[in-house]
Image: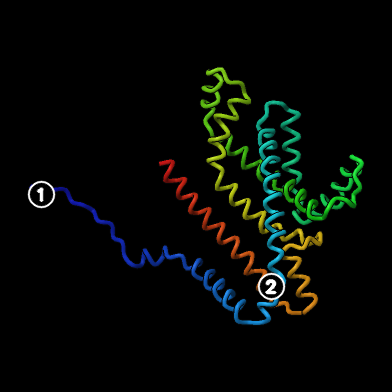
Amino acid sequence: MAGPDIQIPDITWRDNWREFPFWLVAIFAFLIVMAILVFTDPDIREAFLFIIPGIQITLYITLAGFAIALVLGLLAGLGRISSNAVVRNIAITYVEFIRGVPTLVLILTLAFVLVPAVSNSFGVDNRNVSIELRAILSLSIIYGAFLAEIFRAGIESISKGQMEAARSLGMNYRQSMQFIILPQAVRNISPALGNDFIAMLKDSSLASVLAVRELTQRARLYAGSTFRFPESYLVLTFCYLTMTIALSLLLRWYEQRLGKDSR
């Protein structure tokens, strides 16, 4: 008696060729060429040595700003789903206002209008507020609105039965949200949070308009003083691309691991 026919998928080299990450090869090729030039070309190396100290300020602004943005985003996200009409409308106003104004305009407005107004209201001399702190506060307020929508979507992705089950066990709303809903929501939205962290890393370059000496500002200063624009901005591109590609690959690995764990 003949057995059932077994269908063997027709996997050819063309299928593997289509899936090959040519984009990643092209990016790595650029990074390798730039790394070689840093060691072999005196002009590129000089530009690199002048610009690279700005990476410390770039990472400081990004990490501090994102930490504050997480808190603001969580509070605004909870406000977006609040049953209290006042709280909900305040959260919606904050989110929609931020989303409706260009990021560069918001940074200038927050740094030179809001921060001085708030500092003066608390009796603090506006000149004592460092430009780095203004950049951090500006980016955190802006990204807090973006993260609010991510938190809202993450919380709403959890079945309402989870909340009902927690309340039936005697937990109040805060306990149910803290111990049942938020841990699951944060797990679901962690890849999206990672993407926004990478986006903030890139947007930290906008702090250069405040004369913060991060990577972009140092590149502008070097280009302006030496008129070596190709060297300056190729090195700047190399620095940002190295960081973002490394973080993107790490995020992809985490997403794959998260998918395996969920299965």
Q: Nearer the viewer, residue 131 or 182?
A: 131
- Residue at which label 2 appears: 49
Residue 232 position in % (x across, y down): 70, 74
Residue 161 position in % (x across, y down): 51, 25
Question: What colour scheme was applied to this rendering of the protein?
Answer: rainbow
Q: Label 2 to label 1, Cα distance in Å?
A: 73 Å
- Mark 2 lies on a secondary structure that is helix
Residue 180 position in % (x across, y down): 54, 29
Name the residue located 85 percent from the left edge and 50 percent from the top edge: 129
Name the residue located 54 percent from the left edge and 69 percent from the top edge: 27
What amino acid type is highlighted by mark number 1?
Answer: Ala
In the image, residue 193 sits, relative to residue 242, either above or below, namely: above
Name the residue located 59 percent from the left edge and 39 percent from the top edge: 153
Could you tell whether 3 is left or right of 213 in the image? left
Q: Residues within 10 Å of mark 1 (few under 14, many from 20)?
A: few
In the image, residue 192 sits, relative to residue 74, either above or below, namely: below
In the image, residue 3 sits, relative to residue 56, either above or below, namely: above
- Mark 1 lies on a secondary structure that is loop
* Of the image marks 2 and 1, the number of the one nearer the N terminus: 1
- Residue at which label 1 appears: 2
Q: Nearer the viewer, residue 186 or 148?
A: 186
Residue 168 position in % (x across, y down): 53, 18
> Which of labels 2 and 1 is toward the front?
2
Looking at the rendered image, the quarter that the C terminus falls into is top left
Name the residue located 66 percent from the left edge and 43 percent from the top edge: 70
